[in-house]
Amino acid sequence: MIPRSGDRSFDLALARTLAAVSETLKVLPSFAYYDDYDGLNAYATPKVRLVNADGTVLFGQRLLSRLMSGKESPEVAVAAVCAHEFGHILQFKRGLDKVVGAGQRTVKRVELQADFFAGYFAGVRKLQRPNFPAAVFAMTQYHFGDNMVNDPGHHGTPEERGAAISKGFEIAYREKRSLSEAIQAANNFALSL
Ligand SMILES: [Zn+2]
């Protein structure tokens, strides 16, 4: 558990973004970095490390370096991964992962619903800040797609991940739905996959 990235201005900017994700998805997990020596990763767990926290989001330092070396709005790519993980926290908090994951051979529905929530955040953010580069969210998750469709760890193909972000984005940006309406839409979306 490592509290800071080592880059103070990046940490401040990310803290502001995470506060916005918290407010939009109405979850308040604790957040830290960790040493992802065994493979670039970030994850969310319902385990509570701070009193009153909604679980914990851990972000791999190697994944952070990889994303920050990207050319286009690297800090927004980091925010996309964080928003996906906060989406998992929302699922744990409301039991959505149980609903959409029931009877599934892979985690795909649960993962694409987390992408939907990340997209929802991007749409809310773009309404607040019109020059927010929301397309970076779709591109980032597209790149994390995989084609191992029969693997229990299958998260969705690149196309499915990009589309899940877009669906969540539209619910916020075009349809201007509340979080509870977005949750209903996200359940319908995941259950239709
Ligand atoms: Zn995930």
Image (cartoon, grey):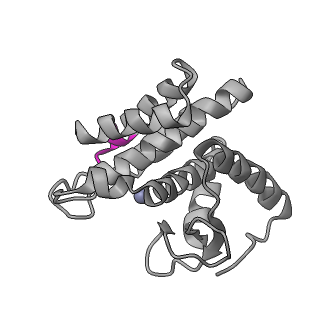
- Is there any visible trace of residue 108 in the rendered image? no
5 and 24: which is toward the camera:
24
Q: Quadrant of the C terminus?
A: top left
Above or below for 134 versus 15: above
* Quarter of the image where one finds residue 128: top right
Number of numbered discs visible in the structure rendering: 0
Vertical arrangement, residue 108 with respect to residue 31, above or below: above
Per the rendered image, the range of residues in magenta is 155-161
Instruction: Give percent across and percent down for residue 37.
Output: 50, 81
Q: Residue at x 80, y 65 (%)?
A: 7
Quick check: which quadrant has ligand 1? bottom left
Residue at 31%, 35% (x, y): give it.
188
Q: Is residue 148 left or right of residue 99?
A: left
Give coordinates of residue 16: x percent, y percent: 78, 50
Q: Residue at x 50, y 45 (%)?
A: 140
- Residue 30: x and y, percent? 65, 68
Q: Nearer the viewer, residue 149 or 104?
A: 104
Q: Where, quadrant-wise, is the N terminus in this rendering?
A: bottom right
Residue, far top: 174
Q: Is residue 5 magenta?
A: no
Q: Residue at x 73, y 51 (%)?
A: 19
Identify the image quadrant of residue 159.
Answer: top left
Left/right placement of residue 87 relative to residue 33 reads left
The location of residue 134, given as percent across then percent down, is 59, 33
Membership of 158 in magenta stretch: yes
Left or right of 111? Residue 33 is right
For residue 161, what is the image quadrant? top left
* 185 or 148, nearer to the observer: 185
